[in-house]
Image (cartoon, coloured by chain):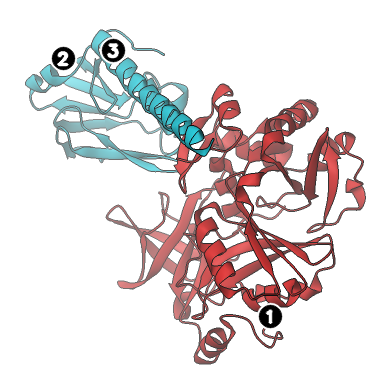
Chain colours: A red, B cyan
Amino acid sequence: MNRTPLYAVHRRAGAKMVDFAGWEMPVQYTGVIEEHQAVRRQAGLFDVSHMGEIEVRGPGALDFCQGISANDVARMSEFQAQYNLLLNERGGVVDDVIFYRLPADVFFICVNASNIDKDYSWIAEHAGAAVEVENVSAKYAQLALQGPAAATIIQPLTLADLGTMKPFHFAFADVGSVRCLVARTGYTGEDGFELYCNAADAAQLWSALLEAGAPAGLVPTGLGARDTLRLEKAYPLYGHELDDDTTPLEAGLEWVTKFSKPTFVGREALLKQKQEGVKRRLAGLELVGPGIARSGYELFKGGQSIGRVSSGTKSPSLGKSIALAYVVSAQAQLGNEIEVEIRGRRVQAKIVSLPFYRR
Amino acid sequence: MEFPEGLKYSKEHEWVLVEGNTATIGITEYAQEELGDIVYVELPEIAEKIVKDDPFGAVESVKAVSDVYAPVSGTVLEINDVLPDNPETINDDPYGDGWMIRVELTDKDDLKDLMDAEEYAEYVAQQKEDDDDEEEDDESEEDEEEEEKG
């Protein structure tokens, strides 16, 4: 099992550890609900060093990145970041990623832990002579400080002007005395920052942030809260809402897919799917009856199977049982009343608009 | 961690309080701690029959659902009405207000298979030790890898 540089720190803090994509990660420290509320109300600090990083460099880097991804990378200036998708020829999602545009023809791509090797092989296979591709995952740790108090907590530790840093922008700066890439990005729906640093500096950065943030209510937060936070915002999780056989048109990610670009891997397949019509769509569910809809549970309308749940939980912010599900397009309209089969019982649910939670 | 005297315990971490021919059933402090925040509880209906070692209900944390196994066979006399709206009561007071169901025992011999407080405390200690052993094994493996790299 893989471990992040902060493994011992988490154990000492009393975290409960679980296997996530082959990584032994903290799922909670004091409790998922308490940690979730801390991020919505003050701030939480996540160790997300299991995430991978791949660097693409060279004079052909921009053109190459345009060709292997769905979003329009050229719209980014240097020191900007962008949510993006790597697609296969069938239009299926190889991974959902963040591109960071560095100066001098360098792109830094943050990828899902479960896909590091797959992504690296896939990118390297497509690379020509004009680019160099390197899997730098082992070099870097990543901490995510998320919540309304995030900027106030980090600002005293850095000379970077966080007040003027817009969402999806980043800077290189010292935080405490640790050199970081500081990005105003996150996966919680709150304001916040993701900090990449050398793996060897992770423990120092972790304790500097926790110490600085404690008076403002900053607490360490685990993957349990990360999952409920992202689910309330309907952010997809690879392996649940996205996989190699699911297209961005099905997943509600057409906004990421820029058909205005003349070519990118998967473009033809997606255009064809768009013309023929998308047969299933990601939809939001709210349970009307009792219970929690879990991943894989089947959906019914009038006795007919119409889809499956991809992720579900009891929303700590809303107190409701919510789920994301793939539903046949003809049944995916808002307000549609359907049923979820929960452990042999059919429970009433309805299709609601996304995200579930708005700040 | 508490292991109240006078209760019987199952290997699946349920507790049983026997009073005459009735048994009150809940999950132990260890079980609720392993589950984390409990957000939903599924209980049987009154008059339903439960069968020893079969699931009679479920408790769900934010992350996962777990079956609750019947430590004894019986007929449900009463369910804890507080739990559907306040499932966290199980976290707060697993041996008291967090009780789940009360049943009429089918066969008092079922109780023979259950542990007393002392035996259960040892059983839990053993389970924790097993967890720790796994972790130590992991660490030695990691050390070996480090050496190979060096």
From this view, report whether residue B122 is shown above or below residue B130. above
Q: Which residue is mark 3?
A: B122
Q: Which residue is mark 2?
A: B20
From this view, report whether residue A336 is shown above or below residue A345. below
Q: Which residue is mark 1?
A: A258
Residue plotted at (76% across, 32% down): A209
Q: Position of residue B84 (x, y in %)?
A: 41, 39
- Cα separation, mark 1 vs mark 3, equals 61 Å
Residue plotted at (65% across, 64% down): A133
- Cα separation, mark 2 vs mark 3, equals 27 Å
**Mark 1–mark 3 contact, CB under 8 Å?**
no
Q: Position of residue B109 (x, y in %)?
A: 7, 20
- Left or right of A357, for residue A3: left
Crowd class of label 1 (few under 14; some 14 to 19; many from 20; radius 10 Å): some
Query: SS of the residue at dot 2?
Result: loop
Q: Is residue A349 visible?
A: yes
| Residue nearest the viewer, comparing A74 with B85 | A74
| Residue nearest the viewer, comparing A325 with A209 | A209
Crowd class of label 2 (few under 14; some 14 to 19; many from 20; radius 10 Å): few
Pointer 1 chain:
A
- Left or right of A71, for residue A305: left
Q: Position of residue B30 (x, y in %)?
A: 38, 22
The type of residue carrying mark 1 is: Lys
| Residue nearest the viewer, comparing A269 with A213 | A269
Crowd class of label 3 (few under 14; some 14 to 19; many from 20; radius 10 Å): few
Q: Are marks 1 and 2 on the same chain?
A: no
The type of residue carrying mark 2 is: Gly
